[in-house]
Amino acid sequence: MAELAMQEGLYNQVCFHSQQCAEKAIKGLLVSQGGTPPRTHLLSDLLPLLEPNPFGDEVEIQLLDRFYIPTRYPDALPGSLPEGLPTYEDAVEALTVARQVLETVVGLIQD
């Protein structure tokens, strides 16, 4: 979905779906490790639960957290993205990180 939104120039949706992709992939990895994912959308809450954590302290992944609330609920927290809606650059960064997370998780689960 994030890639389709990118083709259409819907950058807020690219960022939202990129965060969702990373969240679901990390929750899947947690399950494959025998864990139970908590009811949270924050990657910063999920990453420490991975054992081992193949991502270490990669800040880029946690940066996707900044997109969840303001892109899903744009009127919920005024000013949560100080510059307004995500830009093209934000979308490129979010999509790149989501692809890396998904690729890493798929590789680990397949092994």
Image (tube, rainbow, N blue to C red):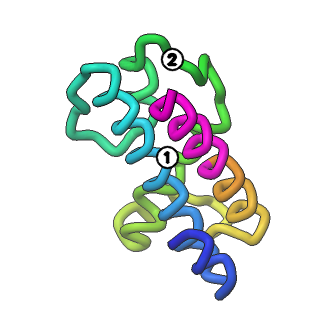
Q: Residues within 10 Å of mark 2 (few under 14, many from 20)?
A: some
Earlier sequence position, callout 2 versus callout 1? 1
Q: Which residues are magenta?
A: 98-111
Q: Are marks 2 and 1 in contact (CB under 8 Å)?
A: no
Q: Position of residue 17 (x, y in %)?
A: 49, 64
Image position of 83 (left or right of 111): right
Residue located 78% across and 63% down the image:
89
Q: Position of residue 30 (x, y in %)?
A: 34, 27
Q: To which residue does mark 2 refer? A: 53
Residue positioned 57% across, 35% down in the render:
107
Among all residues in the image, which is located at the extreme bottom?
Answer: 8
At x 40%, y 58%, the residue is: 69
> Could you say whether the residue bearing mark 1 is in a helix, strand or loop?
helix
Q: Which residue is mark 1?
A: 22
Q: Main secondary structure of the magenta part?
A: helix
Question: Is 91 placed above or below 59 here?
Answer: below
Q: Which mark is residue 99?
A: none
Q: Amino acid at mark 2?
A: Asn
- Residue 6 part of the magenta segment: no
Residue farthest toward the right in the current orientation of the protein:
89
